[in-house]
Amino acid sequence: MSEPELEDLLRSLAPQVLGILLRRYGGNFADAEDAVQEALIEAADNWAAEGTPREPRAWLVTVAQRRLIDHWRRETARRARDERALAVPEAGEDEEQAVDDSLELLLLCCHPALSAPSQVALTLRAVGGLTTAEIARSFLVPEATIAQRISRAKSGIRKAGATFEMPAGDDLVARVQSVAAVLYLIFTEGHTASSGAQLQRGDLAVEAVRLSRMLLARVRAEPALASVLDEVGALLALMLLTASRWSARVDRTGALVPLDEQDRTLWDHGMIAEGVALVQAALREGPVGPYQLQAAIAAVHAEARIAADTDWREILALYDLLAMVAPGPMVTLNRVVALAMAVDPGVALVELAICAADPALADHHRIPAIRAHLLEREGREEEARDEYLHAARLTSSDPERRYLLQRAARVNAGG
């Protein structure tokens, strides 16, 4: 087995093993998670040299249990009681083999007692199987910062008295909504990195898609979650439809290619077909939520054969609905773009001036970037160039900065 294949196997097994330990022993999340990480390290060393065992999950469960027992023995003087209560089964003995603990783990990682950054870090570590170093690289922060977030998250779960079990009633629905929000945040950062040298962080976005598939499968199996099924399905649809454009978003040099200039033959039409089917299923009946509306907008873009075929009036109508269902500064900004395309850039400039007064958008590079685009469409080249340069100074993303500078140079050269 190659090193990448071994890493993928261990990553997929990590949440399963953690779920088994928590289900068997309850106990402290931090202790169980540390034991699993130790087992993964030992597996990476042993399996690379000796080959993968016949029952890799059972091997990991056995080693992790031993690490957990060793820890508890060090921490308590009541060794005899621990040995009786925590008898280690033989390798290969795995009575929970058919149990899928993914939803319980996601719910535990997104406990309301934790901050959003802690929820993200713990979800990627415990359920996504990413190491602390990998998470730190994904978000361009020091490894120590992520380690502190994970440590605080574990401490927060312990202080809150959280248990590895399914919440009930409205609490269950609310927790699933929190999980969806965390996965959307992870995907968004992976799709368009907020800073750094890369436009996209594919591994982060792919992990968000994988976990969203996992979440949707469990929600479909839980009758108590019927009320959020359509929104969770729409979340996955939104990710797939957005990710379908990855191959066309950058050129051979790594430069950003805007949506209206992309080669749509490079789009992943398998992803588009799956995403559109999920959108259609999510919109069949009942009230619509923010993920359903965003996925519907993405579907309109995806189904346009060329940029000129895009139904901007439908997109504008969907943004009008989205502004009522889930108002926010980014929704308002995106609606301005749709207004410019569907109606008139001059009207959109007036709306943009109102948006710019929102304190939440102070110094955000998208305000001058959109203003530059609208001014360029109005034929006001000198003003457009200045706004492109202003936006380039504000962004923390190297690819976006290069793109904005190129647009400024193009306008300055008369197109």
Image (cartoon, rainbow, N blue to C red):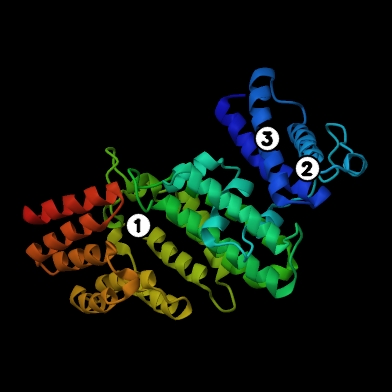
Q: Which residue lies most toward the front here? A: 77
Q: Is residue 382 visible?
A: yes
Residue closest to the eye, 358 or 263: 358
Which is more foreground, mark 1 or mark 3?
3
Compared with 392, 225 (above or below) is below
Dot 2 crowding, Cα within 10 Å, few <14, some 14–19, many 20+: few
Which circle marks residue 117 in the picture? Answer: none
In the figure, is residue 339 to the left or right of 226? left
Question: Where, by quadrant of the figure, is residue 371 drawn?
Answer: bottom left
Q: Earlier in the sequence, mark 1 or mark 3?
A: 3
In the figure, is residue 350 to the left or right of 235? left
Q: Are marks 1 and 3 in contact (CB under 8 Å)?
A: no
* Residue topped by disc 1: 305
Question: Where, by quadrant of the figure, is residue 13 drawn?
Answer: top right
Q: Earlier in the sequence, mark 1 or mark 2?
A: 2
Question: What residue do we see at 15% from left, 68% from top?
Answer: 375
Residue closest to the eye, 192 or 76: 76
Q: Which residue lies most toward the top here? A: 49
User: Which residue type carries mark 3?
Assistant: Glu
Residue 78 locus on image (x, y percent): 88, 43
Question: Where, by quadrant of the figure, is residue 355 drawn?
Answer: bottom left
Q: Which residue lies most toward the bottom here? A: 324
Which is more foreground, mark 3 or mark 2?
2
Question: What residue do we see at 58% from left, 73% from top?
Answer: 284
Which circle marks residue 38 in the picture? Answer: 3
